[in-house]
Image: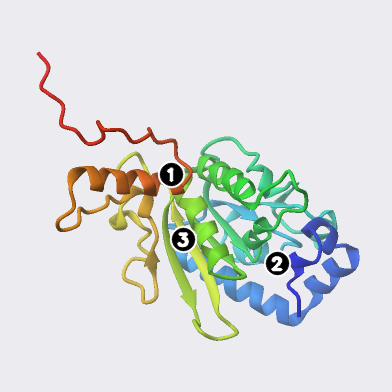
Amino acid sequence: MSRPEDTLPPDLFYNDTEALKYTTSSRIQAIQSSMTHRCLELLSLPGPSLILDIGCGSGLSGEILDSYNHTWIGMDISPSMLGVALDRETTGDLLLADMGQGIPFRAGSFDAAVSVSAVQWLCNAETSDVTPQGRLSRFFEGLYASIKRGGKAVLQFYPKNDAQRQMITAAAVKAGFGAGMLEDDPGTKNAKLYLVLTVGSGGDLSGRDITDAVKGMEGVDIVDERRRGIEKKRGETAKEWVKRKKDRDRKKGKIVKSDSKYTARKRRIQF
């Protein structure tokens, strides 16, 4: 059975018929409720907060946010999904927007963000002049800016394969997030992946700064490699070590100076 994101863009796939079918399915309602509860558990918010619901659809996740007394704003690319949300008189404000074009809110607007079953859609490009990497970059950079310093985001998504999983997490880390990965029911058809993101307050984002809800939890993989140093290998020269670090940064798309005979050479003290 093909995945929805492999058939049509989300705004076309979720037409009036599919939007209503999705919203009225008792199975979908139960899964959506369970995953939103899990997102809130991982966010571990101290009290009622302003939350951005990315890919809010018809407001199923919003109902759970309501039950915790959170205020929420939802954004989605499907007019039909948002139409169903309006018909259901959801309490959140709704915005028609493509998350692959960024997050159109003022910097520091939200205490936290959640997303259920949406981010994997960014891994598909419908036209030749659009790339998944570019859409992911715009999304995560906009998301990072829109969340208050010290805030958090939890994104549940279904990657097609390890390459998609790595592409998504790499884009999040490159945007500046501290990141932890959690998988429920690993190795089963019910496996669900959660990317837990933290926004730094200006200090170093190492493992100790990953959200307390994730720290020490079984099955969590800290993926914040961008902000961790690379240890020098035994027998490795200073030049080899520097070149290895530069190669890592090039793979992440960073601008790095070209290697030369002066790479890693010690500088004389200037007076």
Which residue bears the numbered disc 1? 250
Label 3 – label 2 distance at C-alpha = 21 Å
Q: Judge from the rendering whether residue 125 lies leftward or rightward of residue 119; answer left or right.
A: right
1 or 2: mark nearer the eye: 1
Residue 204 visible to an observer of this rendering = no
Name of the residue lying farthest toward the right: 17
Q: Nearer the viewer, residue 71 or 34?
A: 34
Residue 149 place in picture, x, y as percent: 42, 42
Disc 1 packing (10 Å; few <14; some 14–19; many ≥20): few
Q: Residue at x 39, y 70 (%)?
A: 220
Residue 264 place in picture, x, y as percent: 22, 36
Q: Give the vertical position of 37 relative to 62 (above or below).
A: below
Point out the tag, 3 or 2, that comes first from the N-terminus. Answer: 2
Point out the tag, 1 or 2, that comes first from the N-terminus. Answer: 2
3 or 2: mark nearer the eye: 3
Label 3 – label 1 distance at C-alpha = 25 Å
The answer to whether the residues at label 3 and label 2 have Cβ atoms under 8 Å apart is no
3 or 1: mark nearer the eye: 1
Name of the residue lying farthest toward the front: 261
Label 1 – label 2 distance at C-alpha = 41 Å
Name of the residue lying farthest toward the top: 271
Q: Which of 141 and 70 is in front in this view?
A: 141
Q: Give the vertical position of 7 relative to 225 (above or below).
A: below
Q: Judge from the rendering whether residue 228 lies leftward or rightward of residue 59; answer left or right.
A: left
Q: In which quarter of the image is residue 267?
A: top left
Disc 3 packing (10 Å; few <14; some 14–19; many ≥20): many
Viewport quadrant of the C terminus? top left
Q: Residue at x 17, y 48 (%)?
A: 237
Which residue bears the numbered disc 2? 60
Residue 196 tag number: 3
Q: What amino acid type is highlighted by mark number 1?
A: Arg
